[in-house]
Image: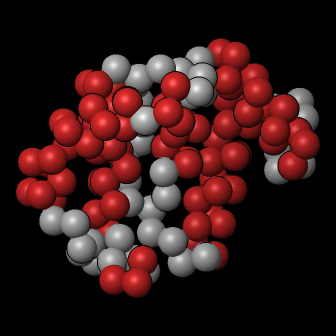
């Protein structure tokens, strides 16, 4: 669920974008002559389709019982928004975030988490 959003965020970094292009070339899911931007789009589309095939919801807001997609997820929007800042601060402090190619600020992490909740495009 999170991986396509994190890739879109990281791909704003040119070095990360090129590395995703190498991954896409290895996987053979886009033309090798495609731009790195198009390769990133292909990788994200591939992962979203895989999530569809595995019945994994695209957003936290539609993450239902037994982890299946639902019209309304089990994390109510008001609870998510109430806890968003603390979740973002804790995510920044997580050891895994330190190895991310693009280091998000707390504000960017909040935006990224909102994209994950609402399944919206990462445009920052």
Question: Residue 122: x and y, percent?
Answer: 42, 36
Pick whichever, 116 or 86, lies toward us.
86
Q: In which quarter of the image is residue 25?
A: top right
Q: Indicate the quadrant containing the C terminus: top left, top right, bottom left or bottom right.
A: top left
**Residue lying furthest top:** 14
Residue 35 horizontal side relative to residue 80, left or right:
right
Left or right, residue 64 beside residue 67: left
For image coordinates 52% across by 25% down, the residue present is 98
- Colour pattern of the rendering: secondary structure
Residue 110 visible at all = yes
Q: Which residue is drawn at 61% across and 76% down?
A: 54
Give the residue at the far bottom of this rendering: 66
Task: Find residue 99 and report its horizontal and vertical position in percent.
Answer: 59, 27
Residue drawn 32% across the image and 69% down it? 62
- Across the whole image, how many numbered discs are drawn on residues? 0
Instruction: Name the side, left or right, on which 96 lies relative to 69.
Output: right
> Can you say whether 95 is above or below 50 in the image?
above
Residue 12 seen in this snapshot:
no
Q: Where is residue 85 in the image (x, y as percent from the top left)?
A: 18, 36
Q: Is residue 4 left or right of residue 116?
A: right
Residue drawn 64% across the image and 56% down it: 47
**Image-quadrant location for residue 31:** top right
Q: Nearer the viewer, residue 35 or 43?
A: 43
Q: Give coordinates of residue 102: x percent, y percent.
A: 53, 21
């Amino acid at each position: 669920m999170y991986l396509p959003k994190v890739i879109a965020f990281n791909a704003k970094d040119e070095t990360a974008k090129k590395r995703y292009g190498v991954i896409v070339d290895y996987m053979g899911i886009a033309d090798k002559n495609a731009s790195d931007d198009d390769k990133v789009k292909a990788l994200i589309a591939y992962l979203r389709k895989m999530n569809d095939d595995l019945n994994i919801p695209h957003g936290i807001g539609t993450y239902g019982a037994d982890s299946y997609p639902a019209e309304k997820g089990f994390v109510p929007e008001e609870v998510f928004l109430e806890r968003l800042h603390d979740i973002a601060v804790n995510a920044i402090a997580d050891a895994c975030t330190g190895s991310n190619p693009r280091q998000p600020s707390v504000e960017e992490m909040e935006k990224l988490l909102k994209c994950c909740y609402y399944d919206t495009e990462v445009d920052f």
